[in-house]
Image (cartoon, rainbow, N blue to C red):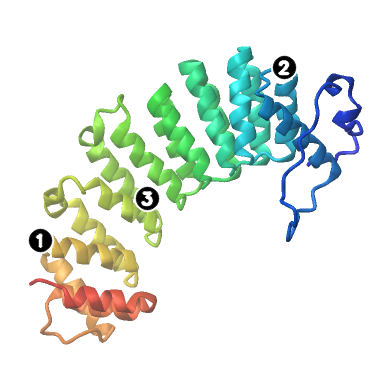
Amino acid sequence: MPSSSSEQAYVPLRQRAEWADVRPVPQDEGPHPVVPIAYTEEFRDVMDYFRAVYVARELSPRALRLTTEALLRNPGNYTIWHFRRLVIDSLDSDLVEETLFVDNLAKANSKNYQIWHHKRWLAEKLGPEAANDDHDFTRFILCHDAKNYHAWSHRQWVLQKLGGWDKELDFCHQLLEEDIFNNSAWNQRFFVITRSPLLGGLSAMWDSEVDYTIKAILQNPNNESPWRYLQGLYKGNPDSLITDERIPQLLLNILKENSYCVFAWNFLLDVLCKGLRPNKEIEEAVKVFTELDDAGSSDQDLPTRICSALERMDPIRVNYWAWRKSNLTL
């Protein structure tokens, strides 16, 4: 609720000449309210007059101004937003000015469903001309809250409906340069690779994306996000996961430097279960580590030995690894 000392003192609507002809409609809480909400007089005054114009379906400039006052005090009220849209349509109001109002409100309420819904409604009406401004706005929100679901969802919608794909891959790269653990940026990168009409789809980008992801994994093997991303790159073509020579080499490089990397062992387990025929180096790496870790007997197959090792390395998910081991098909 506005309370800055720099603002003018609130003048009740009943004292404003503009509203002299309107009879406010109080909230009906029944004859015996059990736990009535302690509204401030200012909030109660604004809402009582809003109900009056809402009931009367008054689609006027003063009704629009009243919804502004109401939303500044309760930006989550979907009825006010709905009525505001009716008024805007009726008055053919300036949508650019409305966008500025909503953006300012969103900066202080960036996880408000109703605000983002209203932004989408505005973008639909403005069309492609709104794309750049909406991308700039979501970029601003994500700089302050990198995992804001509402901003990411809106950004993806704008890309698909209004455009702006040409700079999106660079944006994802920038975010990952700033924070390689940003799983939301990894998710957006996959969205761009697979949905952008400018890149040719995953098949066209697959080889370079595998290299990009391997580089990210080597920088920090204990970052789960690029491991998941790498799995996603092979999802539509599992055979290539078995035949791509970069995969066993990656796993060997990681396990030689970081023998307790759960994500590397998990990935190796997955590719072995999908049919990878391990070379002697991988076999030796598994045997050496599992013997050092005392995980399983030496006559067990590689997937079983890996599961046993993971039960020890990852005790939080010990039951999961035991389940994986019990479901191995050899």
Tell me the crowding category of disc 1: few under 14, some 14 to 19, or many 20 or more residues within 10 angstroms, Cα based.
some
On screen, residue 269 above or below 177: below
**Quarter containing the N terminus:** top right
Task: Please indicate whether residue 257 sits to the left or right of residue 111 in the image.
Answer: left
In this figure, which residue is indicated by the disc labeled 1? 275
Q: Which residue: 19% across, 78% down?
A: 305
- Hey, which quadrant is residue 193 in on the image? top left
Mark pair 3, 2: CA separation? 55 Å
Q: Which residue: 38% across, 54% down?
A: 225
Tell me the crowding category of disc 2: few under 14, some 14 to 19, or many 20 or more residues within 10 angstroms, Cα based.
some
In this figure, which residue is indicated by the disc labeled 2? 61
In this figure, which residue is indicated by the disc labeled 3? 216
Residues tagged 1 and 3 counted as in contact (Cβ below 8 A): no
On screen, residue 84 above or below 313: above
Q: Which residue: 19% across, 58% down?
A: 248
Mark pair 2, 1: CA separation? 69 Å
**Quarter containing the C terminus:** bottom left
The disc label shown at residue 211, or none: none
- Hey, which quadrant is residue 59 in on the image? top right
Residues tagged 2 and 1 counted as in contact (Cβ below 8 A): no
Mark pair 1, 3: CA separation? 25 Å
**Which of marks 3 and 1 precedes in the sequence?**
3
Q: Secondary structure at mark 1?
A: loop
